[in-house]
Structure formats: C-alpha cells, structure tokens
Image (cartoon, helix red, strand yellow):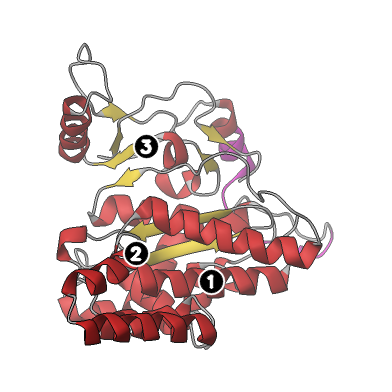
Amino acid sequence: MVFQAGEKEAFRATMRKLEAFAGVRVVTYCLMSNHFHLLLEVPDRATLPRLDAEGLLRVLPLLYDPATVETIAQELETARKSGNATWEREILDRYEYRRGDLSMFLKDLKQRVSMFMNKRLERSGTLWEGRFKSVLVEGGEAALQTVAAYIDLNPVRAGMVGRPEDYRWSGYGEACGTGKGSAKARSGLGSIQREGLETPGSVTDWEVVGERYRRLLYVEGVERPGEEVTGEGGRRGIAAVEVEQVVAGNRRMTLPEVLHRKVRYFTDGVVLGSAAFVEEAFGRLQEQGRISGKRRTGARKMRGADFGELRVLRDLRVRVIDDAGV
C-alpha cells in the first residue's frame, strides 16, 4: 500500500498539471492505496487549437523546471529570428503530439508518479505492471453518472470511510472541500449533469449539481441492530433478509446497490452506453479489423443487476459483480 497521504497529494498535483497541459478533463477520480481510477473527457484533437510559441511557454512551467523552460524559450527565439517557420513548427510539434491523447496522458502520469515514488522509496523500475484498462463511455448522463458514482464510492466500498465526501483524494471528496482544487473537481462533476438539469447554467452551481450527485451516491445500507436493551446505536436500512436474497441471487440488484460493489463492466466492458452508442463503436472497431467480421451485433445486456438501458460491448460471464475488493 504505497500511496499514503503525501503520495496521494503529489499524485493529484501531477494529474492536474498534466490535465491542463494535455487538454483533457478529469471528470472525477479516486486515488486508492495502490491503484487509481479516472473518468476522463478526451477532446477531439482536431478541435484543440495548435500550440504557438506563446501558448507553449505558458503551459511548459506546469511540467518542467525553470531552466528547461528557459532553454526551450531560447530555442524558439532563435528559430523565430532565423525566419525559418519550419524549424519553429518542429519545436512546437515535439509537444503538440502529446495533447488530446489518452495514452500519452496516462503514460506521462504513470511515468512522472513512478519517478516521484522511486525517489521517495529509494527504488527503481516500474511502479505498475501491465497496461491500464480503459472503457469508452457514452457522453450521456446515464452512463457518465453511473461510472462517476462507481469511482467516487471506491473508498466507501473498501471500508476506508463511511461517507464518500469524507475521502479527500477523490473527485467528489475534493469537490466537497474548500481547497484550491475544489472548483476544478466541481466543474468536472457538473459537466456530466447537463441533461437532467432544468437550466443549462446550473452546471456551475455546486448547490444544485452537488446535491443532485450526492443523492446518487447515497444509498441505503444494511440495517444495524442497536444496543440490545436500549436500542441505541442502531441504524435503519435494508432488511437483512433482503440483503441475503441479493447475495443469494434471488433478486436482481438495483443500480444504487450495484455501486457498492466491484463491477467488472466498468473496467473490462470496452464500451459502455446506450445500445445505439455501443453499436456505433462496434461498427468502427469492425471496420478497423479489431473485431471479427463474424460477429453481427455489438450491444450486449449487462448481467447481475438492473442496469436499465445501459449496454456494453463485451459480454462478461464470470463474477461480473463482486463484494470482494475494489
């Protein structure tokens, strides 16, 4: 369990700097003791304005020390004075290709965090083994809020805190705080609530979006018997017999109940969203030769609970929902 409070703060600071540099949006996140979860909005690279010298020098201090920034500034100035536009563009393109790219963002993040941890722990080598897992999520509110809530409830499911707002190193926990990063966290959670809000401008009103998201996160827990004689210390909740039925598989779990558990669809489902969204992605992947031409349809229903209209590309069959681990 290598990530303690100090390491998590360093991870979050690095993540936010790379977010600004790469032009992605961290919708929400959760930093656990030995792994992390991110819900990212990755822009169409064609919509990102190309870097110019001024723009590059504005973002470089996020990632590099002053001496390195000054060296690059001098190189750009020399290229400008020479009148060689191609030379200047080549310098800019060394950084341009890293923007708006999911793989590059995560590569940079893991690499920089690994360097920090290696120095801190006096070790060498990689910090994580294997490649990250990613799922393409439809941009609609149903899919986005389901995945966001799943991420923000990780510390609750792990027994680290009793309430999601009590965990500092998650999107929701940061949004509920008053630190300098709270506005960024609130903006991310507001961005996924446009469809269900009465007025579009409410996405920036934390009293509105915060309470709405909080209602999604809060679900009833199993009943807790109080002190045998006085009844004090008890808490009302789901009847124990109903919980037993869920565990035994006699009743399909509701979505709020599912969010208390590890759901493999959110890491291994490949594509998550409405049937139309999954079918569209399926068609693109088949054209690219990444899915067999023998397969006729893409959207698959999700097992083990009532997931509503959500569908996935990969039909998982074994232990899709698990109480053990997060």
User: Which disc is residue 306 wearing?
Assistant: 3
Tell me the residue at 59%/68% (across/down): 11
Furthest residue to the front? 82
Give the spatial CA distance, label 3 vs label 1: 37 Å
Q: Residues within 10 Å of mark 3 (few under 14, many from 20)?
A: some
- State which quadrant residue 168 falls in: bottom right
| Segment colored magenta | 229-244
Left or right, residue 137 beside residue 287: right
Residue under circle 2?
Answer: 94
Q: Residues within 10 Å of mark 1 (few under 14, many from 20)?
A: some
Which circle, 2 or 3, is nearer the viewer? 2
Q: Is residue 30 visible?
A: yes
Check disc 1 and report the residue beneath it: 14
Name the residue at the right extreme.
229
Asked if residue 81 is positioned above or below residue 104 in the image, the reply reads below
Q: Amino acid at mark 2?
A: Arg
Whether residue 206 can be seen here? no
Q: In percent of the image, x 54 and y 49: which residue is there?
A: 260
- Assign the magenta stretch its main secondary structure: loop
Q: Amino acid at mark 1?
A: Thr
In-image side of 194 versus 13 (left or right): left
**What SS does tag 2 mark?**
helix
| Mark 2 vs 1: CB contact within 8 A | no
- Looking at the image, residue 213 sits to the left or right of residue 180; the answer is left
